[in-house]
Amino acid sequence: MKKILLTAIMLVGLSAFSKAQQGRVGINTTTPAATLDVVANTTDPSRPDALLIPRLTRTELAAKNAAYTTAQNGALTFVSTLDGTAAGKTINVTATGFYYYDAPNSVWVAVGGASAPNLNIYNSDGSLTGNRTVTQGANILTFTGTSIEALLKVLTPSDAFGIHHTDGTISLKSFIGAGKAMWGTTTSHDLAFVTNNTRKAILTKDGDFGIGTETPQKKLHVNGDLQVTKELNVGGDGTTAGSAGTAGQVLTSNGAGVAPTWTTFSSGATPTYRTVAGSASMAILPSDVGNVVLFAGGINGSILLPTPDASMIGKKLTLISTDILSHNLTNLNANYKTVTYSSMQQSGSEFITDGTNWYSLGGQ
């Protein structure tokens, strides 16, 4: 009986050897139809029929990186646990399952998933499945191109940020929203403008813009020469234009916190003549402001200046005596305290008003 069993075993072995010599191996079959042909046992439902390939965790697979070279192209394995990190050859190992080794690209690729070349950002488009971070370390990330259209583009929906830079305190962002493209800080910090590696202008966090200064005192502060080649508008408000005035008008200050106004100087009408006799007084009429008033006669006659108002702003009042006698200049009220001399000679005296006070321009 032992001889018969030994003979049967030898015959089976010789048969398998014969098939192996033909380049084919069969399991549960004596007629393998391929290099390796595994035939299931369908008569025994209690016995599992399957092919178990090597099972490794992600960390264990990564530890064998050096073992997988060109000769292992197409090797199959099963990743059972996602421990460690996805990096290097296991960069695509992001889920448990079957993976094959793609030797030309030195990566493991999920069976049924996209191959490594399709994930190459240098020749194919794709979509991020989550946040990604490029850790540059001390390295510089540079983009170069040979076309004027070789631009770095960041396309985002309305109200979405494009480029964001922060040092943990200052935040600089570009974004699109409300039909506008915006660029600036989103924190309470100034925004400087630099040329030739030197700051030339600054927009403060309070909205003041300085050119040639980093401490602007007004909404626009120019520390240097200013050239205006077109009209100069004053007045108006945040939504309406100011006025450029008319030819020949001059810009007159209305004091702090108030916009200046364009005013017209008198064209120099025919002088008005007055006669002051003895110690009589004579009042200058509001209509005289802007004209030349000539006086004659009298010894100590007083000349009364009119109460200033807005209609007199920008107009010059000239008083000239036609004789060698003095005439006292008298103030009607406290507003005239800026008239610093009390007599007028032949050489004349000139005055202007800001609508509140009279100011002397010179004379006797």
Image (cartoon, grey):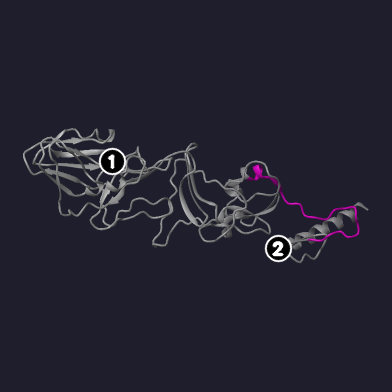
Could you tell me if residue 198 is visible in this image? no
Q: Which SS type dominates the magenta stretch? A: loop
Residue 165's place in the image compared with 51, above or below, is above
The residue at which mark 1 appears reads as 307
| Magenta stretch: includes residue 51 | yes
Residue 26's quadrant in the figure?
bottom right
Q: Amino acid at mark 1?
A: Thr
Foreground: 163 or 71? 163
Front position among marks 1 and 2: 1
**Residue depicted at x 36% and y 54%:** 242
How far apart, in angstroms, are the residues tagged by discs 1 and 2? 124 Å
Residue 48 located left or right of residue 247: right
Query: Residue 163's x, y, as percent?
Result: 49, 49
Question: Few, some or many C-alpha atoms within 10 Å of disc 1 (few <14, some 14-19, many ≥20)?
Answer: some
Query: Residue 238's x, y, as percent?
Result: 43, 50
The residue at which mark 2 appears reads as 23
Could you tell me if residue 257 is visible in this image? yes
Residue 139's place in the image compared with 245, above or below, is above
Quarter holding the C terminus?
top left
| Magenta stretch: includes residue 149 | no
Residue 191 located left or right of residue 34: left
Query: Residue 48's x, y, as percent?
Result: 85, 53
Q: Earlier in the sequence, mark 1 or mark 2?
A: 2
Label for residue 41? Answer: none
Q: Amino acid at mark 2?
A: Gly
Foreground: 83 or 41? 83
- Bounds of the magenta segment: 38-61
The local secondary structure at tag 2 comes to loop
Residue with the most extreme right position: 1
